[in-house]
Image: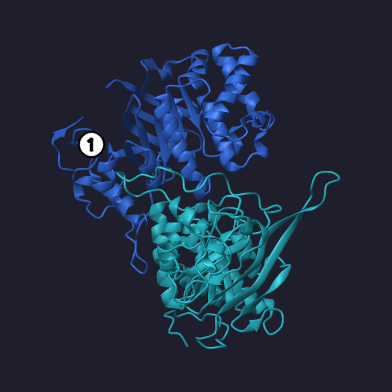
């Protein structure tokens, strides 16, 4: 199918079922709430970590998820990998419902994940080669073939197998460990790789190396990426489309250029404006937003951003705006200011063709 | 311009199972009201340099040579009593993780008041009044109520503000900042940076700001020293370093940040990894990764070349105007 230049046998990837037009991953109404103990005698509280999140990932594209801590981006990744049970929602992999037409075991082969902490995510008692070979062996590959594959993949991620195969995780640097984690993810021939802050802990010069590597691997293995990061520069560089999350909800999504050039949600605007300047003569003078992100325990009703939004109106505190199309390119935002005729004073007029600024 | 801090030929070794040459032959100075950035990647020695300035390194396992002078006082020669007066009153420090730097069992107000009582001999009432004033200075909302908060009751941004309040409570001349915004969310980071910039002007402090993030340095620093493998490889004004870096490492570091890199384009990278610090450098530490390296780079230590007034690069390729020693 794909001409992967690997001499060793790899596991056969999960076959492409729906063809190119079918999204590789469809997520509908994904929800995860965590109960937390309140004070004595007070009502139980809930962290709404992920609340009714829907999106899809097309074959071969890179979708970025950005947001601040507590916005639910990592919980989303863990729900997709089935590392924790979801409360509600559907996860469909290439048209197959996980648990019905696709077993969890098959899903794990089709979807792999790279975590932020390169050290914690490797078994300290296994050599690098053993760690990479572990997955294929579980999925029925012979020990010898799995080890050969592991060495081959080490080469692919830029680590000489002769030097690195027999080392333990503590014997290599952070950047090298993250390369091992990427090789381990690839060992099961996945089609989708979830990168959860995979380059965030690396130094800048190493980060650039790993980002180049990810681009090479994507081309060579025909991968699809879901790239989660708090670093807007990195997300802009690597993503085709981007999701902006705030307190468990998607507030804006669309092609990365559209979102960066004409952000529609005030939170997206604040987030982009909060990036440090790159010009010494043009420093930031006024913070784009004040205060900290609110606690995801019992988030505010209505639009969750209304407590920090400079344009909030009574309407925003009452009901939650839903993601609405801004154009035909798939740019959507969940803000009453972007919904024609919503009743917000800054909303565009309802009539079509009107100047909707 | 009088220099508040003068560091000369500072060498720091950590001994133990193996010796680490963390800082090698480092010289720098800090002027009055100046914000100096120490920019570098992990292990480049920036935090160690900062800690040496306050003598916070473990005594038994650290060998320090060279000289560190702050306001004319020899820091390396201070006894414990002199040190404890020096810390907090002359020089004070803020850290990356306020949750770890603050004491979890005392309220914020108590911690600030204690510092003021200890250093300035004020009564508890006066000290508490100062604590309240400081919380207002760092713009903590409903400051009066927050005096009685414990660190765990505050959000990350508020805790960082509280730590700044604590550090500035005795109006130090010099503030040392060790990546104080790295652990914060993007929208909070910029608020803290702007607050620090404002307080620096208001208090007329000098600041040494350690960071690995060039964007952060651009927002706050006047001058920058780029560190690599325990040495300063280039020093100059922020503008010069950002616009026209001279040292190949500084150039690579700036090129590999993805500010404005276009999608699909390959990022410029510095190949390889930083050296281990097992031996004191006898030649250019960056030579093995440098695209412009020549045989003489690995023969001896490159000189500090003065490229322009106030601009020094440690590279044989830097075009000298005057060779500094």
- Label count reads 1
Q: Please determine whether, in this image, residue B254 is positioned above or below residue B73.
A: below
Q: Chain of mark 1?
A: B
Chain in blue (letter): B
Q: Is residue B164 above or below residue A131?
A: above
State the image coordinates of residue B196 (x, y, percent, origin top left).
Answer: 45, 34
Rendered position, A337 above or below B199: below
Q: Is residue B218 visible?
A: yes
Report the front residue among A316 and A267.
Answer: A316
Quarter the C terminus of chain A occupies = bottom left
Direction from residue B145 to residue A266 in the image, left or right = left
Task: State which quadrant residue B38 falls in.
Answer: top left
Q: Which residue is mark 1?
A: B311
Of B135 and A116, the residue lying toward us: B135
What residue is shown at x 44% (from left), y 39% (from top)?
Answer: B194
Query: As drawn, is B20 to the left or to the right of B100?
Result: left
Residue B109 lies, in percent from the top left, at 64, 26
For residue B181, say whether it is visible: no
The chain whose colour is cyan is A
Q: Nearer the viewer, residue A237 or B9?
A: A237
- Residue at 32% across, 46% down: A282
In this picture, residue A314 sits left or right of residue A333: right
């Amino acid at each position: 199918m794909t001409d992967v230049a690997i001499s060793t046998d790899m596991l056969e990837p999960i076959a492409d079922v729906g063809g190119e037009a079918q999204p590789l991953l469809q997520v509908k109404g994904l929800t995860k709430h965590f109960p937390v103990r309140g004070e004595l005698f007070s009502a139980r509280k809930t962290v709404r970590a992920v609340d009714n999140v829907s999106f899809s990932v097309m074959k071969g594209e890179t979708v970025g998820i950005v947001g601040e801590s507590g916005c639910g981006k990592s919980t989303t990744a863990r729900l997709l990998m089935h590392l924790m049970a979801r409360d509600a929602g559907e996860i469909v992999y290439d048209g197959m419902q996980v648990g019905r037409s696709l077993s969890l075991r098959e899903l794990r082969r089709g979807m792999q994940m790279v975590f932020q902490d390169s050290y914690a995510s490797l078994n300290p008692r296994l050599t690098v080669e053993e760690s990479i070979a572990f997955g294929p062996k579980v999925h029925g590959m012979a020990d010898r073939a799995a080890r050969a594959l592991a060495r081959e993949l080490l080469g692919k991620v830029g680590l000489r197998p002769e030097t690195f195969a027999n080392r333990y995780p503590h014997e290599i640097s952070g950047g090298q460990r993250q390369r091992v984690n990427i090789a381990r993810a690839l060992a099961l021939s996945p089609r989708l790789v979830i990168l959860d802050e995979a380059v965030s802990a690396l130094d800048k010069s190493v980060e650039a190396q790993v980002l180049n590597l990810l681009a090479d691997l994507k081309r060579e293995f025909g991968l699809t990426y879901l790239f989660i990061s708090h670093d807007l520069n990195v997300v802009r560089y690597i993503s085709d489309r981007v999701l902006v999350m705030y307190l468990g909800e998607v507030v804006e999504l669309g092609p990365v250029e559209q979102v960066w050039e004409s952000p529609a949600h005030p939170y997206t605007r604040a987030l982009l404006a909060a990036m440090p300047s790159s010009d010494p003569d043009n420093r930031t003078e006024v913070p784009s937003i004040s205060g900290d992100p609110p606690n995801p325990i019992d988030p505010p009703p209505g639009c969750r951003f209304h407590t920090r939004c400079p344009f909030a109106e009574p309407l925003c505190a009452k009901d939650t705006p839903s993601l609405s199309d801004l154009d035909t390119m798939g740019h959507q935002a969940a803000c009453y200011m972007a919904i024609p005729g919503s009743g917000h004073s800054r909303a565009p007029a309802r009539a079509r063709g009107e100047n909707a600024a | 311009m009088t220099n508040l801090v003068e560091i000369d030929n500072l060498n720091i070794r950590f001994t133990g199972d193996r010796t680490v040459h963390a800082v090698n032959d480092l010289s720098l100075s800090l002027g009055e009201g100046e914000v100096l950035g120490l920019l570098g990647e992990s292990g480049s020695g920036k935090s160690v340099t900062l800690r040496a300035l306050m003598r916070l390194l473990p005594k038994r396992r650290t060998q320090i040579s060279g000289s560190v002078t702050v306001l004319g006082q020899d820091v390396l020669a201070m006894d414990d009593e002199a040190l404890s007066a020096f810390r907090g009153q002359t020089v004070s420090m803020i850290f990356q993780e306020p949750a770890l730097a603050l004491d979890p069992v005392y309220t914020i107000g108590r911690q600030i008041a204690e510092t003021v009582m200890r250093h300035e001999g004020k009564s508890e009432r006066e000290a508490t009044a100062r604590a309240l004033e400081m919380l207002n200075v760092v713009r903590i909302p409903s400051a009066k109520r927050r005096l009685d908060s414990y660190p765990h009751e505050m959000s990350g941004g508020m805790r960082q503000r509280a730590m700044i309040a604590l550090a500035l409570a005795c109006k130090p001349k010099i503030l040392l900042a060790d990546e104080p915004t790295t652990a914060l969310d993007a929208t909070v980071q910029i608020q803290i940076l702007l607050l620090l910039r404002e307080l620096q002007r208001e208090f007329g402090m000098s600041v040494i700001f350690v960071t690995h993030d060039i964007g952060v340095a651009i927002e706050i620093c006047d001058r920058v020293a780029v560190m690599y493998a325990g040495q300063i490889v280039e020093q100059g004004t922020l503008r010069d370093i950002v616009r026209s870096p001279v040292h190949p490492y500084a150039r690579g570091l700036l090129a590999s940040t993805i500010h404005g890199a276009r999608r699909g384009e390959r990022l410029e990278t510095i190949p390889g990894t930083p050296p281990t610090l097992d031996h004191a450098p006898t030649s250019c530490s960056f030579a093995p990764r440098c695209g412009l390296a020549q045989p003489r780079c690995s023969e001896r230590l490159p000189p500090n070349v003065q490229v322009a007034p106030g601009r020094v690069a440690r590279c044989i390729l830097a075009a000298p105007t005057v060779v500094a020693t």
